[in-house]
Amino acid sequence: MPYSWVSKELTLDREYKRGDKGGKVRSIQEWLSLQGQSVSIDGAFGPATEAAVRKFQTRCGIAVTGSVDSATFTALAAPLAAAIAPIAAAGKTLNDMILAYANQHLVQHPLEVGGQNCGPWVRVYLEGNQGADWPWCAGFACFILRQAADATGKPMPFKRTFSCDVLASQAIATERFISGRNIVKGKVQKAEIPPGSLFINRRTDNDWNHTGIAIAFHDDHFETIEGNTNDAGDREGYEVCQRIRGYEGKDFVKI
């Protein structure tokens, strides 16, 4: 695992049981909730958490102890391990790998848990950060780009950022920025934007407030995989979704 903050989310330092408290207990409770065994995420391993662990262990065919050892935690965090698993890059372009990793994450249905912009998925995309002040759409997109770049041995097309505004400014500086207005006017052809590029939602001429990965382009709409959204397409949602969007109010970062 080349990313230390991701390794932290996937490993357990010791066995945890009733009476334990702390951040790792909170992580256990997050994964229990994400795995359908909803408990209070308070960092205290009480009887409810123990009961949830027993139910999860029974469902998974793990020895039912009520405590969380390495085997149980590995099963709890299995969706994250599946999402970050290496994909063979032989013969594939950077854009191919962006699409492959984006789909691999999408299948695992990353979700917030324990509060706005919180939980293990958010911390992975934001390199350990979380909380109400940490929207994670750009973090998701940049994490996917980093996985793809590392897999192909190519450099990142721009510096990783958690900010849509910084993403837009970097795209402008590196001549990767494509104005959606020019697409609507026919000045730029959609075929010039390869799938695996990013879209950024334009609020004003100098303010962008959401981003994601564009996976396919059509005459009057495009398809995306994006983080921190939901079925309604909100810019402050709670999950990774695949969506269909129109070109109005969208700019693009060519990858």
Image: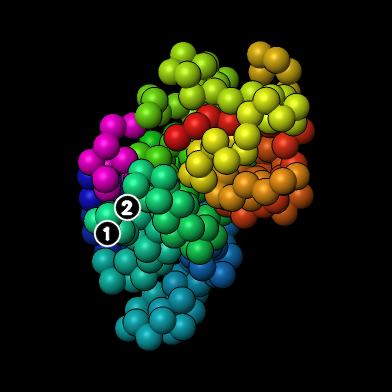
229 drawn magenta: no
Up-down: is 173 above or below 199? above
Disc 1 marks which amino acid? Ala
State the extent of the magenta-drawn residues as a range. 147-156
Up-down: is 3 above or below 166? below
Q: Can residue 202 be seen in this view?
A: no
- Cβ atoms at labels 1 and 2 below 8 Å apart: yes
Query: Distance of mark 1 from mark 2, alpha carbons?
Result: 8 Å
Q: Which of 77 and 23 is in front in this view?
A: 77
Q: Quadrant of residue 19?
A: bottom left
For disc 1, the marked residue is 88
Residue under the point 66% across and 13% down: 206
For disc 2, the marked residue is 92
Residue under the point 40% across and 40% down: 145
Left or right: 146 with respect to 184?
Answer: left
Q: Which mark is residue 49?
A: none
